Image: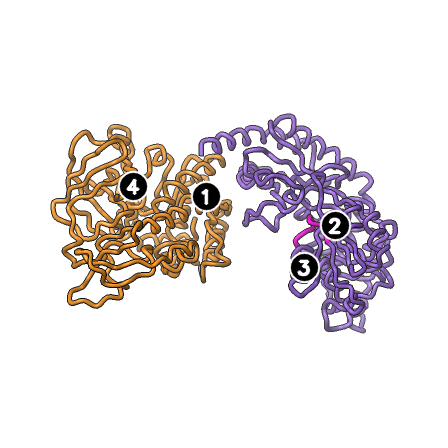
């Protein structure tokens, strides 16, 4: 069965330059980057190259890039690290949006148990945080504001520059989880006016187990893994050289292909969205305003997404309901809940997230298969 | 697929026979808190590994709300009413062969197979007949009495003709090493430690209402901590000392009275049953002879049975039966064939 992959916000296949680089480095550059000798120097050079590539993707300096094992680690390090760093100043207030990824939500919850005051910023039905809400929530005790750049479930872009300006105006640090924008849209940390940004390699054609936390020069964050002196003492542990090298290659590839890919993927996404809205009655797109080009989240009335997801998989079409991390628990999507949707709608949304390798023929196939599946499932739901 | 050996082998045999198999496991309750040390998450992983080993897709579907609505809520209501419920039967007819069956049809499936020890044959009249599993020690037909012809049409019991030992051998032959030697599941899945009283009180603290233990003459012999702790026929846990062994003979949820008496007081030769299902879809026009089983581990006893109306039936045993417990099922058999059954009033 030919399979169609529309779940790129969960993970992406390796782009070929990243795969080549991964294999070559794994085979040839197996030294420990901390070693003094030739083998170590070879590995260190590979890491330097990868760091420069990631910095270029972000509009940052290589020395500001700390390698991590992925987005969750970056989010943890940024949020925990910033709260810890500012504790001596008496700032013990954390502000996050209510539609953050679990990596930030659960970290905030853990900090709250240790006495940190946490404020969740609301979002309207658009799925966007309003700067006014942040202005109202900020206090002189606020240590950190963390708002994601693009939401992983619905794709809406948040007004990071405006939010960051407000936060920094009150002396708070600003972190953004840019896992869903890195490699999809141009990023410029200076223009965003932020302090911390986390990314994950496997969301943009790199390998799992690699990511980066950008820490603006001058922001003093303590070590988040203690041990050796790797990553300037901030993240101890022998580096995952092949995966980090592949991230560098994926970053270069994304930077070069983004201008061509983004509009093409957006056109496919729009074709899919319009096709579904036109062919399947009682469907609605969740979230409005600017979005990442590859994502659409669609509610299909009277069909539990769990059923539709499985029925589509049996047809060879891979999509997701909400975020992959919450599958198996059937928690209503916290994102759609925060947007104020009724319970049923939080359980019947499907996320389609496209990639550069998707084709018009694939999209048309999905649009042709979906209506009959929905009709069938609605009929069975009505019977039961 | 529960992750146990029976449903794993059922799936494996169908797959081997060339059917396109879709593995589905139901997550029925949150085992992460509140239910002690249940191993259900590990069981779901076992099911996933079986599917992956054999090479068919496997999905975990969440039926927590349906299970709670159809099975656990009924379990609580029945105990609160002084009855002794059978959650497995409700799970079969209301969850597996209704909600899950609808899902399966949504996936394009032509049948819903389970690991039940029961068999199906088609009679000369074209109707399906439900038979006891070939392994009488493992027979589960008692829990399937409430399935209708429509439900049975979609049902498949691939291990029903096998013995448990055969099933374990088949599991080994199919390479399902992780499940071949798994112990049988015990009792009620959502009360893994078997302490129903503690489960019920946690779910509904108001159940722990004290009441009187009285004898058949109406004299108070002691006090108890709630009618949900008792089942008709129960002997242990009464906290009484008497010259003769005493058994629970009646439970009155309204007055909270638990009546006890000697074993003879338990003997009854008639019962009526409600929500009766006749497997053929047609209640008999007159008295019929049948063997009637009044609980899972009961040797079916000969009786006369007649339909009182479409959904009620009366049973008259040839000899008195001990401990006919309201809430349990009375299932009518003709030899190995399930004729029907209902819930004891």
Q: Residue at x 79, y 51 (%)?
A: A251
- A127, A170: nearer the viewer: A170
Query: Residue B145's image quarter?
Result: top left
Does label 1 lie on the same chain as label 3? Answer: no
Q: Is residue B125 magenta?
A: no
Q: Which residue is mark 3?
A: A107
- The image position of residue B95, as x and y in percent, is 41, 42
Q: Which residue is mark 4?
A: B145
- The image position of residue B238, as x and y in percent, is 26, 63
Question: Closer to the N terminus: mark 4 or mark 1?
Answer: 1
Tell me if mark 3 has few (under 14), some (14-19) or many (20+) residues whose alpha carbon lies within 10 angstroms of its own: some
Q: Residue at x 41, y 47 (%)?
A: B73
C-alpha distance separating marks 2 and 1: 35 Å
Tell me which chain the residue with mark 3 is part of: A
The image shows residue A174, relative to residue B310, as above or below, that is below
Residue B29 shown left or right of residue B259 in the figure: right
C-alpha distance separating marks 3 and 1: 32 Å
Does label 1 lie on the same chain as label 2? Answer: no
Tell me which chain the residue with mark 2 is part of: A
Q: Which chain did the image draw in orange?
A: B
C-alpha distance separating marks 3 and 2: 14 Å
Query: Residue B246's image quarter?
Result: bottom left
- The image position of residue B156, as x and y in percent, is 36, 40
Q: Nearer the viewer, mark 4 or mark 1?
A: 1
Magenta span covers which residues?
A96-102
Query: Are the residues at dot 3 and dot 2 in contact (C-beta closer than 8 Å)?
Result: no
As drawn, the label of residue A148 is 2
């Amino acid at each position: 069965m030919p399979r169609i992959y529309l779940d790129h916000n969960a993970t992406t296949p390796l782009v070929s330059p990243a795969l080549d680089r991964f294999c070559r480095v794994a085979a040839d550059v197996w030294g420990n980057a901390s070693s003094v000798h030739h083998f170590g120097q070879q590995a260190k050079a590979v890491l330097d190259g990868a760091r420069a590539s990631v910095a270029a993707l972000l509009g940052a300096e290589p020395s500001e890039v700390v390698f991590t094992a992925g987005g969750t680690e970056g989010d943890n390090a940024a949020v925990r690290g910033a709260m810890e760093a500012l504790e001596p100043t008496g700032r013990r207030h954390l502000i996050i949006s209510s539609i953050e990824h679990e990596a930030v939500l659960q970290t905030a919850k853990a900090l709250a148990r240790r006495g940190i005051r946490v404020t969740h910023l609301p979002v309207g039905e658009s799925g966007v945080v309003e700067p006014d809400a942040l202005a109202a929530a900020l206090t002189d005790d606020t240590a950190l504001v963390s708002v994601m750049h693009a939401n992983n479930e619905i794709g809406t872009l948040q007004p990071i520059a405006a939010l960051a300006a407000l936060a920094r105006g009150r002396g708070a640090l600003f972190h953004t989880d840019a896992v869903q924008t890195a490699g999809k849209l141009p990023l410029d940390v200076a223009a965003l006016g932020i302090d911390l940004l986390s990314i994950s390699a496997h969301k943009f054609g790199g390998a799992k187990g690699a990511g980066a936390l950008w820490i603006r020069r001058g922001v003093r964050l303590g070590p988040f893994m203690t041990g050796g002196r790797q990553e300037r003492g901030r993240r101890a542990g022998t580096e995952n050289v092949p995966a980090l090298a592949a991230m560098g290659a994926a970053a270069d590839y994304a930077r070069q292909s983004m201008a061509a890919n983004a509009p093409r993927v957006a056109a496919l996404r729009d074709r899919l969205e319009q096709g579904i809205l036109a062919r399947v009655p009682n469907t609605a797109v969740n979230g409005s305003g600017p979005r990442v080009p590859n994502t659409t989240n669609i509610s299909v009335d009277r069909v539990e997404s769990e059923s539709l997801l499985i029925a589509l998989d049996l047809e060879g079409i891979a999509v997701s309901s909400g975020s992959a991390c919450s599958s198996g628990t059937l928690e209503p999507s916290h994102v759609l809940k925060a947007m104020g949707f009724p319970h049923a709608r939080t359980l019947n949304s499907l996320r389609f997230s496209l990639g550069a390798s998707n084709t018009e023929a694939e999209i048309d196939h999905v649009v042709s298969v979906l209506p009959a599946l929905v009709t069938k499932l609605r009929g069975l739901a009505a019977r039961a | 697929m529960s992750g146990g050996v029976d449903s794993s082998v059922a799936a494996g045999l169908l797959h081997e026979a060339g059917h396109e198999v879709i593995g589905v496991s139901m997550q029925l309750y949150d085992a992460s808190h509140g239910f002690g040390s249940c191993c259900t998450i590990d069981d779901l992983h076992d099911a996933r590994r079986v599917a992956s080993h054999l090479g068919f897709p496997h999905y975990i579907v969440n039926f927590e709300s349906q299970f709670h609505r159809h099975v656990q809520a009924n379990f609580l209501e029945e105990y609160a009413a002084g009855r002794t419920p059978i959650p497995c039967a409700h799970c079969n007819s209301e969850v597996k062969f209704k909600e899950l069956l609808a899902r399966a049809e949504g996936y394009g499936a032509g049948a819903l197979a389970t690991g039940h020890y029961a068999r199906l044959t088609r009679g000369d009249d074209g109707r399906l007949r439900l038979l006891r599993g070939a392994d009488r020690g493992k027979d589960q037909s008692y829990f399937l009495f409430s399935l209708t012809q429509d439900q049975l049409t979609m049902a498949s019991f691939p291990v029903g003709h096998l013995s448990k030992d055969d099933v374990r051998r088949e599991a080994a032959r199919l390479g399902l090493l992780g499940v071949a030697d798994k112990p049988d599941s015990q009792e009620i899945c959502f009360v893994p430690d078997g302490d129903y009283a503690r489960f019920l009180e946690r779910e509904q603290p108001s159940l722990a209402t004290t009441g009187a233990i009285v004898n058949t003459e109406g004299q108070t012999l002691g006090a108890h901590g709630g009618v949900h702790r008792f089942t008709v026929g129960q002997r242990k846990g009464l906290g009484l000392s008497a010259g003769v062994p005493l058994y629970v003979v009646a439970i009155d949820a309204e007055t909270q009275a638990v009546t006890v008496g000697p074993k003879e007081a338990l003997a009854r030769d008639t019962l009526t049953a409600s929500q009766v299902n006749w497997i053929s879809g047609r209640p008999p026009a007159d008295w019929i002879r049948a063997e009637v089983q009044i609980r899972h581990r009961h040797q079916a006893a000969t009786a006369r049975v007649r339909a009182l109306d479409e959904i009620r039936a009366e049973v008259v045993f040839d000899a008195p039966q001990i401990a006919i417990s309201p809430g349990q099922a009375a299932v009518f058999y003709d030899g190995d064939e399930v004729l029907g059954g209902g819930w004891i009033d």
